[in-house]
Each structure stands twice: as C-alpha cells, then as structure tokens.
Image (tube, grey):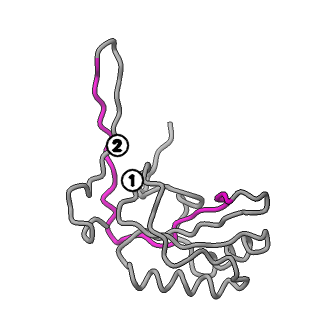
C-alpha cells in the first residue's frame, strides 16, 4: 500500500521530495540541456491528474543553452502566477518525435486543496471510481 504523507500533488519527477531549490532546478535544467532537451514552462490552477494540458508560459526554449535563461523564465512565471502550479517540461526531439523526457513541479500554491476519490457500486458488482478536486466550483483565479 502506497501512501502520500504530505498530501501534496504528485505529478512528475521528484513529487515525493521537498520542493527543489533554484540551485537544484538549475542542475536539472543543465542535465536536460546536456542531453539535448528543449525546456518549456507550464502552469495551471487545476492540477487534476487527467488534466495533461497545462497552459504554456511563453514558447518552448529550443534555442536556450544556459540554465540561467531557463530559470529566468521560471521566475517570470512564478511572479506572474504565484498561486498556481508551475512545472518544467523537457522535450526530446532526437528521434523526430517530440516527447516529454522530464517533468517536475517548481511552484505550488500555498494551499493545495487536494482531491477526493468517490466510489460507487453499480450493477453486477461493478465499482466505478471518480476523482474530484476539492477546488471544483471555485472561480478560476481562486482554485490554487
């Protein structure tokens, strides 16, 4: 049985670790750059597990080769959306198909509303499950 003692959103790499420092984020950015990955920054106030398409902050940084430039974009996003989830995405296009090679959260809102799992029994002993955000129904700018 797996547990999440922190009750924090767990998407991407490093989810069960304490928040990364800017120095640790820079080290991960450098690792990705050394592999030839292109970085992008995304944000959302609705981090539902099935919400794969977060809003992109700026354009993917295919031309940046310095972690400081990528981190500058992260900090700009943090300043613009301080109460949102912000994640880094590294794309590997070496095989001609753009796919995510790394993904991790670099910003969280002060309050994380979390999710609840609803279970219902249907005919034939079938169980149905639904995940619902505790933030559902709140205005978009008040969810995080």
Residue at 28% over, 27% down: 120
The residue lying furthest to the front in this view is 96
How far apart are labels 2 and 1 at the CA level? 8 Å
**Which is nearer the N-term, disc 2 or disc 1?**
1
Residue at 43% over, 52% down: 5
User: Is 134 included in the stretch rendered in magenta?
Assistant: no
User: Is 115 included in the stretch rendered in magenta?
Assistant: yes
Q: Are marks 2 and 1 in contact (CB under 8 Å)?
A: yes
Along the viewing direction, whichever of 53 and 30 lies nearer the viewer: 53
The residue labelled by disc 1 is: 48
**Secondary-structure class at tag 2:** strand
Q: Quadrant location of residue 21?
A: bottom right
Tell me where the magenta segment starts and ends, as one range.
98-122
| Residue 102: percent from left, percent from top | 65, 62
Label number found at residue 82: none
Q: Is residue 69 above or below residue 5?
A: below
The residue labelled by disc 2 is: 131
Local crowd size for mark 2, using a 10 Å CA cut-off: few (<14), some (14–19), many (≥20):
few
Q: Quadrant location of residue 89?
A: bottom right
Q: Is residue 20 above or below residue 6?
A: below
Residue at 68% over, 83% down: 67
The prevailing secondary structure element of the residues shown in magenta is strand
Residue at 51% over, 79% down: 58
Along the viewing direction, whichever of 140 and 95 lies nearer the viewer: 95
**Quadrant of the snapshot with the C terminus:** bottom left
Local crowd size for mark 1, using a 10 Å CA cut-off: few (<14), some (14–19), many (≥20):
some
| Residue 18: percent from left, percent from top | 52, 66
Q: Is residue 36 above or below residue 72?
A: above
Q: Is residue 50 above or below residue 54?
A: above
């Amino acid at each position: 049985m797996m547990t999440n003692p922190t009750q924090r959103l767990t998407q991407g790499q490093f989810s069960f670790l304490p928040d990364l420092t800017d120095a640790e984020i820079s080290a991960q950015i450098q690792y990705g750059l050394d592999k030839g990955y292109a970085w992008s920054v995304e944000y959302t106030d609705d981090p539902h597990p099935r919400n794969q398409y977060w809003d992109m902050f700026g354009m993917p940084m295919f031309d940046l080769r310095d972690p400081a430039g990528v981190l500058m974009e992260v900090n700009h996003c943090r300043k613009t959306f301080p109460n949102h989830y912000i994640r880094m995405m590294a794309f590997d296009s070496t095989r001609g198909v753009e796919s995510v090679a790394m993904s991790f959260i670099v910003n969280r809102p002060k309050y994380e509303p979390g999710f609840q799992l609803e279970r219902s029994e249907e005919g034939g002993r079938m169980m149905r499950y639904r995940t619902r955000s505790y933030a559902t129904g709140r205005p978009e700018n008040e969810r995080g």
